[in-house]
Image (cartoon, helix red, strand yellow):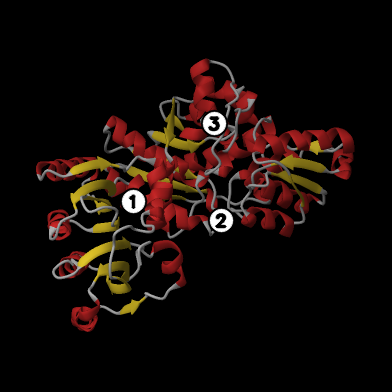
Amino acid sequence: MPEEILKRVLTAPVYDVARETPLELAPLLSKRLQNKIYLKREDLQPVFSFKLRGAYNRMVQLSDEEKKAGVIAASAGNHAQGVALAASKLGVEATIVMPETTPPIKVNAVRDMGGNVVLVGDSYDQASAYAKKLVEEKQLTYIHPYDDLDVIAGQGTVALEMLRQFSKPLDVIFVCVGGGGLIAGIASVIKQVSPKTRIIGVEPEDAACMTEALKANKRVVLDEVGIFADGVAVAQVGEIPFRIAQTCVDEMITVKTDEICAAVKDIFEDTRAIAEPAGALAVAGAKKFVEKYQVSGLNMAATVSGANMNFDRLRHISERTELGEKREAIFAVTIDETPGSFKEFCELLGKRRAITEFNYRYSDSNHAVVFVGVRTEGGYAEKEAILAELKAANYSVQDMSDNEMAKLHLRFMVGGHANGVQNELLYRFQFPERPGALLNFLIHMSEEWNISLFHYRNHGSAYGRVLVGVQVPPEQHADFEAYLESLGYPFVNEQDNLGYQLFLRPTND
């Protein structure tokens, strides 16, 4: 099988529509990982993905009758764009069935290229089943995204380019895996030309169909498939890619959502390009491989397979990046609800570290639970040191860094209507986002009046934004305002804000 793929790769006319993409050194990532990391920039293709190669190589083989009847494909986006552009080039009508969960940027791109889009189901597999139904009804030719020799050969041209672009054999190549077409094409070529090069496939933990198939020594169907990395959200790996992987893929690695988000940031910092989650998979795998085996001084390549990013998804990615890099830890810490305890806790935690998040709401007169995020440049070891330090100071502390509910929901929900809070005032502040600014703010706010609500989250901007509830007797309101003026931070009184009245105002007021 690999021999047949290589033969087809050598004659694939993909450059009618595709371009040879660069293999670029990622200097920042290379320095951090102590290995030379090269990025194969398939995000620079006309459709911002490698999928154009395989789609065109398959469609150029169609007979005149097949071209006249038209083609159909199922795709979460990138294969769809490849088919649509190839169809436009060849003058063929194309129908593309896409999951309803496909990011709008991909749907719109297919329509802009002349493809007839049909939205069906929540996953690729549901879209694929419907597309195959239309094949029978309308006598269309199905262009499979990965389980086809010509499609795989088209993707294999990526490997030929890497062989030309790097003067000596690469030690390791990391490839994202969905249905398996890309890794089948790359592995078929590399293992025949450079057999000592290790081929590592990378999948999300919640969409690891190739990993499970290789474990079971047969193709399996996943019960559920995560769709964060929608470009590889496949329940069952292709039959041909699986057979090739059994002999040509050395290892599979799975990565978490946070690790994918961190890889998106890594690629951006080295290239100023924004990869989609599936496009950053290989980089996430490379980082995990280096951490697992503690290797250094190797020449490694990772496919940046796509950049069809839905802009709205960046918000979620930026929130999860620091956790994925182990540069942030989040804790739930119980402190005494007594005068000065809030200040003592902040001084202990913030005297040497940057606080990234701070959420607190008064709940009872005995104890308070604070949801706090801390920058941890030292990774896991520093997180453990913080835990030990807090426990040594007799704080009850829980590590929430791997708690999915905490990361997705609790951090945005800390608050609510408090009982027993008298004379609460609510203010919104802005302060310069520099080391020590938040700690200075916390310390000064704790000296004379009781803090009953506190919310802060670092958003990477020049100014930090804080929402604070403070218990101040009515006769001291003027003094308190004068005190706030002396701090030098811009502030707004939000006492009459409708959001406060509906969601935060103490029930006894």
Residue depicted at x 77% and y 37%:
131
Q: What is the distance, in whole Å, between disc 2 and disc 1 at their CAs?
A: 20 Å
Badge 1 element: helix
Query: Does label 1 or label 3 sit earlier along the sequence?
Result: 3
| Quarter assignment of residue 284 | top left
Q: Circle 2 sits on which residue?
A: 310
- Residue 493: x %, y % from top left: 34, 78
- Is 122 situated above or below 189? below
Please tell me which residue lies in front, 475 or 496. Answer: 475
Q: What is the distance, in whole Å, between disc 1 and disc 3 at their CAs?
A: 37 Å
Query: Does label 3 or label 2 sit earlier along the sequence?
Result: 3
Examine the rendering and report whether any part of residue 329 can be seen: yes
- Is 121 situated above or below 235? below
Badge 2 element: loop
Please tell me which residue lies in front, 239 or 437. Answer: 437
Amino acid type for the residue under numbered disc 2: Asn
Q: What is the distance, in whole Å, between disc 3 and disc 2 at their CAs?
A: 33 Å
Amino acid type for the residue under numbered disc 1: Glu
Q: Circle 1 sits on which residue?
A: 322
> Left of 310 or right of it: where is 348?
left
> Left of 164 or right of it: where is 437?
left
Are circles 2 and 1 on residues that touch, CB within 8 Å? Answer: no
Q: Circle 3 sits on which residue?
A: 189
Judge the density around disc 3: few (<14), some (14-19), many (≥20) Cα neighbours within 10 Å. Answer: many
Judge the density around disc 2: few (<14), some (14-19), many (≥20) Cα neighbours within 10 Å. Answer: some
Please tell me which residue lies in front, 17 or 314. Answer: 314
| Quarter assignment of residue 290 | top left
Residue depicted at x 29% and y 53%:
363
Badge 3 element: helix
- Residue 431: x %, y % from top left: 27, 73
